[in-house]
Image: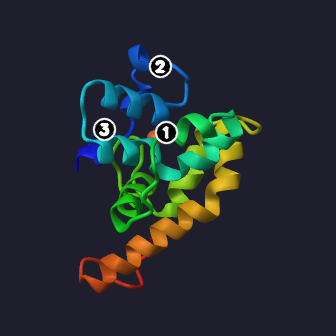
Amino acid sequence: MAAAVLHDVGYAPHLVDTGFHPLDGARFLRAVGANERLCAIVAHHSGARVEAAIRGLSDELAELADERSPLRDALWYCDMTTGPDGQRLTFDERVAEIERRYEPGSVTRWFLAEGYDELEAAVQRTTRRLVAAGLAIADQPM
Ligand SMILES: [Fe+2]
C-alpha cells in the first residue's frame, strides 16, 4: 500500500535530482528514513531498470535491489492498469495512454518499447495470481 501511494513521489518538483523519478523518489524516501524495502520497490517500479539503462543511471539504480517478487509485480500491475486520474485501464489501454502523452523519440516512448515485454509479463503474472485467488475472472482483459 505504501509503495502504491508513494511510487511516483519522485515527480515532486522539489525532489528532482537526477530527473529519473523512481530513483529520486527512492532516495528521498531513504533520506527520510523509510523502510529499505519500500525504497527499493519504489526505485524499481514499472520497468525502472530499463529506463535507467537508457538514461545512463544503471549504477545509481543498483544501489537498491529489485526483489522481483509477487508484491513488486503487483505494484507494476496497479501502475500499468490505472490511468492518470485513477481510472481502471487494461494494460494495452495504459500503454496507449502513455504513448499519447509523450512524443515519439522521447525517453519514455523509447522505454515503453524496450520495457513492454517485462511490463506485460508482470501484469500477466499478477493477473494469474488474482485469478488463482478468486479475485479476478480469467477471461477479463488485463
Ligand atoms: Fe512512475
**Circle 1 crowding by C-alpha within 10 Å: few under 14, some 14–19, many from 20:** few
* Above or below, 78 relative to 139: above
Report x, y in % for residue 29: 31, 31
Report x, y in % for residue 80: 46, 55
The one nearer the camera, 37 or 99, is: 37
Mark 2 lies within 8 Å of ligand 1 (Cβ measured): no
Q: State the residue at coordinates (54%, 69%).
A: 121
Report x, y in % for residue 66: 46, 53
Mark 1 lies within 8 Å of ligand 1 (Cβ measured): no
Name the residue carrying label 1. 63
The one nearer the camera, 79 or 100, is: 79
Q: Secondary structure at mark 2?
A: loop
Cα–Cα gap, marks 2 and 1? 18 Å
Whichever of callouts 1 and 3 sits on the residue coming sooner in the sequence is 3
Mark 3 lies within 8 Å of ligand 1 (Cβ measured): no
Q: Nearer the viewer, mark 1 or mark 3?
A: 1
Disc 1 vs disc 3: Cβ atoms closer than 8 Å?
Answer: no
* Above or below, 137 relative to 96: below
Q: Amino acid at mark 1?
A: Glu
Q: How many marks?
A: 3
Q: Which mark is residue 16?
A: 2
Q: Amino acid at mark 3?
A: Leu
* Above or below, 17 relative to 27: above
Q: Amino acid at mark 2?
A: Val
* Above or below, 45 relative to 22: below
